[in-house]
């Protein structure tokens, strides 16, 4: 393919039409550094076929500089940038001039206005119109390039949040993948503007990442943060504070209590150089809720996803099935709530074996892992699962298991009732026909008989109905869950989608996972 540098859109288009490729696009303003190289390397790792091209653009966008900012002196060195980009794995570089991006001048193109709730926070307070300029140019660039995927860094977190929201609101079907801030050995975040710092300023500037990292360490031990202390120490290092704040990582609203994923973010001036840095704060590790109807394939993909993430896997359906087995085993009438309560109140329910492939479920020391999959248990479980006592008992147990996070739980009510504050919520579903087909294969594998796929479909629909119509914690998509319809997708396809959803909610910095 060779390594190409294009200046005009026409040259680029000509070349692209010869390649018959899709584009993974990394927009930059140049001044490339190891942070950009990391994005390019990640893009390269993510190439799923040889038809994908990694295209890096270098365009110093005048619209995102405010009056008096460093537009004129922003580092411009195409040869050096090209060398860095190609050595990291870029296939082509596009270096358009202003009129390639804004052919009629900026006033003849639509401009994007970022919602105030996102703009009037953090960097947007001082940099009036900055994010409007960023959003406007991104729309121009993707219009010209028409990429399949956009790769962005988490370093400019506010920008990332704004672009994600922009694409979501305009239903732009381009995937955005983001990757962690890269730092040098001292923890100092790479940035094109670091070249402005004199040696002595660089020494002072080190206080910014150091204090943010210290605050994170203190928070993880003591669950408190003192912004006042950080402020006074930053000042002590001759850094002028523009802001230092704790905000919700997605809404960017200021937070007093750290719940969900929060961002400790700061902007300072070191001499005339503006520097930003941040870290994420969480009161526990992430929780993923996977809900959905019977036979949607939750267990298979959830188990595998847990393995890839190094998370605890919690199959809540197995818990409802285990108590159902115990009730049947003791010949208790499924509608006799008094006896059910009596037998369950002291029942010992445990998952054993940390090995995910062999997770077994025990009730009162009996291994019921296989027994709970019998058609008999399947036909009664929804009747048991709707009872208040059963739900309260199992919900509490599930919440205890998930207390410190690092867990992926599957069931019917995880995102709505068990972990309503889960960080990632996925509603996994498929048509009843597809689910009946999958269920038949599962039963065959386990050596159980079934009459016909049509009967299985009927049984699945009946169970869906019971699960969705029960009074307490019914099966329903949480308002903030992302629906994933798995018809026609194989396991690896579903895992790819789940990874994408996970990464759009959990920054790489919070949960770096090499095998995702
Ligand atoms: O394997 P399958 O998809 O058929 O279901 P499961 O996850 O093993 O769950 C079996 C039954 O337990 C469901 O049909 C529900 O009635 C009940 N259940 C529930 O009520 N709440 C949950 N969180 C999980 C399962």
Image (tube, rainbow, N blue to C red):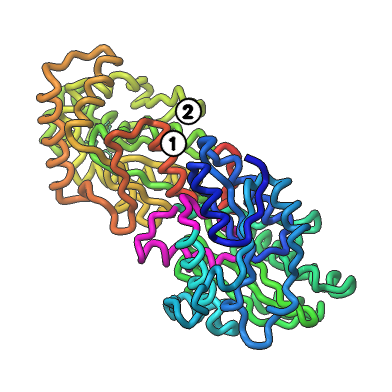
Whether residue 69 is visible here, answered yes or no, is yes
Q: Is residue 497 located in the magenta-colored stretch of the structure? A: no
Question: In the rendering, at what x and y percent does residue 263 appear?
Answer: 56, 66
Q: At 27% from the left edge and 36% from the top edge, which residue is drawn?
A: 487
Which comes before the other along the chain, label 1 or label 2? 1
Q: Which residue is mark 1?
A: 313
Whether label 1 touches label 2, CB < 8 Å: yes
CB of residue at label 2: within 8 Å of ligand 1?
no
Q: Is residue 505 visible?
A: no
Query: Could you tell me residue 465's position as x and y percent?
Result: 12, 41
Q: Quadrant of the N terminus?
A: top right
Residue 159 vertical position relative to residue 181 in the rendered view, above or below: below
All told, the count of numbered labels is 2
Image height check: is 309 above or below 171?
above
Label for residue 356?
2
Q: Residue at x 22, y 46 (%)?
A: 475
Magenta range is 145-174
């Amino acid at each position: 393919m060779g390594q190409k540098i294009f200046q005009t859109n026409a040259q680029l288009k000509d070349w692209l039409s010869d390649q018959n490729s899709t584009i993974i696009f990394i927009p930059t303003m140049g001044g490339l550094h190891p942070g950009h190289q990391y994005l390019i390397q990640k893009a390269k790792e993510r190439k799923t076929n040889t038809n994908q091209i990694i295209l890096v653009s270098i365009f110093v966008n005048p619209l995102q500089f405010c009056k008096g900012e460093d537009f004129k002196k922003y580092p411009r060195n195409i040869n050096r940038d090209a060398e860095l980009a190609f050595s990291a794995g870029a296939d082509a570089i596009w270096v358009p001039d202003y009129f390639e991006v804004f052919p009629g001048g900026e006033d003849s193109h639509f401009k994007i206005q970022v919602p105030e709730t996102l703009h009037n926070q953090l960097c947007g307070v001082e940099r009036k119109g900055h994010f409007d300029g960023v959003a406007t140019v991104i729309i121009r660039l993707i219009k010209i390039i028409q990429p399949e995927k956009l790769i962005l860094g988490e370093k400019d977190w506010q920008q990332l949040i704004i672009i994600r929201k922009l694409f979501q609101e305009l239903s732009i079907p381009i995937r955005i993948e983001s990757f962690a801030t890269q730092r040098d050995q001292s923890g100092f975040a790479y940035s094109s503007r670091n070249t402005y710092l004199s040696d002595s300023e660089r020494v002072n500037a080190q206080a910014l990442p150091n204090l943010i990292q210290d605050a994170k360490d203190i928070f993880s031990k003591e669950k408190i943060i003192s912004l006042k202390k950080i402020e006074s120490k930053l000042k002590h290092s001759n850094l002028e504070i523009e802001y230092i704040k704790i905000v919700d990582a997605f809404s960017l609203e200021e937070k007093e209590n750290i719940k969900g994923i929060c961002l400790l973010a700061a902007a300072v001036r070191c001499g005339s150089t503006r520097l930003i840095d941040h870290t994420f704060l969480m009161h526990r590790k992430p929780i993923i809720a996977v809900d959905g109807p019977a036979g949607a394939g939750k267990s298979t993909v959830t188990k595998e996803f847990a393995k890839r993430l190094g998370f605890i896997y919690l199959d809540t359906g197995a818990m409802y099935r285990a108590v159902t087995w115990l009730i049947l085993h003791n010949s208790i009438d499924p509608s006799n709530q008094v006896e059910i309560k009596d037998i369950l109140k002291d029942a010992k329910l445990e998952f054993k074996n940390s090995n995910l492939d062999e997770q077994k479920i025990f009730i009162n020391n009996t291994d019921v892992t296989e027994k709970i999959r019998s058609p008999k248990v399947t036909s009664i479980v929804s009747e048991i699962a709707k009872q208040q006592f059963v739900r309260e008992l199992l919900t509490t147990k599930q919440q205890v298991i998930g207390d410190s996070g690092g867990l992926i739980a599957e069931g019917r009510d995880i995102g709505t009732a068990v972990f309503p504050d889960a960080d990632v919520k996925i509603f996994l579903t498929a048509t009843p026909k597809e689910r009946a087909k999958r269920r038949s294969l599962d039963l065959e594998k386990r050596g159980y008989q079934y009459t016909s796929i049509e009967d299985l479909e009927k049984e699945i629909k009946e169970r869906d109905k019971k699960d969705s119509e029960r009074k307490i914690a019914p099966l329903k998509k949480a308002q903030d869950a992302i629906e994933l319809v798995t018809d026609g997708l194989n396991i690896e396809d579903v895992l790819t989608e789940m990874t994408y959803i996970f990464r759009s909610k959990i920054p790489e910095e919070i949960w770096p996972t090499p095998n995702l």
